[in-house]
Image (cartoon, rainbow, N blue to C red):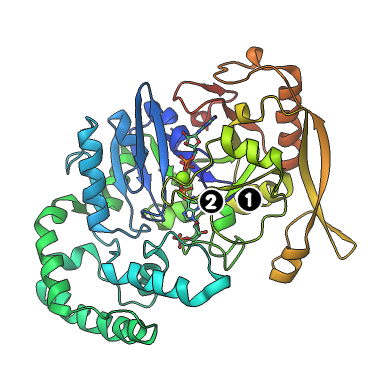
Amino acid sequence: MANVAIIGAQWGDEGKGKIVDWLASRADIVVRFQGGHNAGHTLVVGNQTYKLSLLPSGLVRGKMGIIGNGVVLDPEALFNEISRVREQGLDVGPHNLRIAENVPLILPLHSALDKAREVARGKHAIGTTGRGIGPAYEDKVARRAIRLCDLAEPETLSHKLDELLLHHNTLLKGLGAEPFDKQELLDRLLGLAPKLLPYAEAVWERLDEARHENKRVMFEGAQAVMLDVDHGTYPYVTSSNTVAGNAAAGAGVGPHFIGTVLGIAKAYTTRVGSGPFPTELFDEIGKGIGERGREFGTVTGRPRRCGWFDAALVRQAVKVGGVQGLTLTKLDVLDGIPELKICTGYRIDGEVFRRLPAGLAAQAKAEPIYEVLEGWTQSTKGARSWAQLPATAIKYVRRIEELVEAPVALLSTSPERDDTIMVTDPFAG
Ligand code: GDP
Ligand code: IMO
Ligand code: MG
């Protein structure tokens, strides 16, 4: 048996959802282990497009979905998403979706604080999704979070809300935002309890059983290594660890259970939100990539910033994320560009770096060092085998493989589920 973890190797939106869905045909369980409804995973299956934020992508294949304790869960966002996908014909309920009883909840005060802080940051705003992710993780680490299991204990909930509101209302008032009323929040949570509690369980036990039964488990990452709270371009990051190592802590399994780690990267680079982006393009080529790649945020609707493939950055993500195989997506978006550039390192104050230094001032000064490769005029859109790819496209993929020091396991050539080329089977272990 081999399990697989899928993580983003750039700044998010690499196509994790598509790849998880494609691989999920051969898995039994798909687990989300970090992040929240800041994620937006798009799956295209025939004439249906599913946009998932909290639900594990395996549900589209009819597989069991688990939301692990490492996620921050907004109950209202969850129910909205469940209703939306039910309208698209998906069957989702407590029989096929299980949620860790110890998952921390996102409450309306978290997004209020997230937004108020972004306003206060002014030109230093992070460009968060405004969904309360950061404040919810802060509360978890500060040991004052309301967790799913608390909904079954009204008294516990009541006294935890006192502590939570003392903290949040002080902050919100200081930022000029409206404070929250305890009774209103308590009623809201107790109202959600009968709908939410049927999904709750000790998911670690289910995963332990799955291990004994040799079931295949996939861990679906959200965000990406360069948005990781430790390893990313801090402070322009999200508030969780996105590296594969966190799949164990965020689901309640041992590190050996995670299996093969696949890193997903686009054949170029994009970023939503603020922060350093050395290979960003401000010209017609960048605009063209954005248009052909339909680079608009699933969650925010904002245009994504586009740039050349940054091999130095992905190499770093491969190392710290524990990536054993790379999946390159959106190769088709580069069709027709005569010359392609790949960043192999940076020049900072005359010195050459093969990694992005951690300091903000150094990052801002990083000038990419480029290698130029020949592009291709033929279409790769929808290719399903190596044989259908032009020689220059294969050369481009092979060069990336060398530079990032990870073998390419899968290639994706369109949003459609089956437009995928398997080079090596990640489940083979
Ligand atoms: P995720 O957050 O990593 O799951 O990625 P998103 O779903 O936010 O963004 C990826 C976008 O690219 C989605 O709209 C996908 O449908 C689309 N996509 C995925 N793979 C490919 C591909 O190989 N080619 C093209 N053209 N689009 C793709
Ligand atoms: P998926 O799973 C791309 C970015 C936000 C912002 C920063 C912090 O679809 O790849 P947050 O709301 O998390 O506090 O915002 O992180 N961000 C993402 N960018 N894809 C995502 O998820 C993202 N989730 C958060 O734009 O810059
Ligand atoms: Mg996304």
Residue at the extreme top:
387
Q: Nearer the viewer, mark 2 or mark 1?
A: 2
The residue located at (17%, 44%) in the rendering is: 94
* Residue 202 appears in view: no
Disc 2 marks a residue whose amino acid type is Ala
Q: Which label sits on residue 172?
A: none
- The answer to whether the residues at label 2 and label 1 have Cβ atoms under 8 Å apart is yes
The residue located at (53%, 69%) in the rendering is: 125
Q: Residues within 10 Å of mark 2 (few under 14, many from 20)?
A: many
Where does the N terminus fall, quadrant-wise?
top left
Disc 1 marks a residue whose amino acid type is Ala
Q: Name which quarter of the figure residue 134 lies in.
A: bottom left
* Residue 6 appears in view: yes
Q: CA distance from mark 2 to mark 1?
A: 9 Å
Say whether mark 2 is within 8 Å of ligand 2.
yes
The percent coordinates of residue 261 (x first, y second) are 54, 42
Q: Earlier in the sequence, mark 2 or mark 1?
A: 2
The percent coordinates of residue 159 (x first, y second) are 17, 81
The percent coordinates of residue 415 (x first, y second) are 48, 28
Mark 1 element type? helix
Q: Is residue 195 left or right of residue 141?
A: left
Q: Which label sits on residue 317?
A: 1
Residue at the extreme front:
284
Q: Name which quarter of the figure residue 219 lies in.
A: top left
Q: Is residue 367 left or right of residue 103?
A: right
The percent coordinates of residue 27 (x first, y second) are 37, 31
Q: Is residue 423 left or right of residue 86?
A: right
Q: Which label sits on residue 224?
A: 2
The residue located at (30%, 52%) in the rendering is: 204
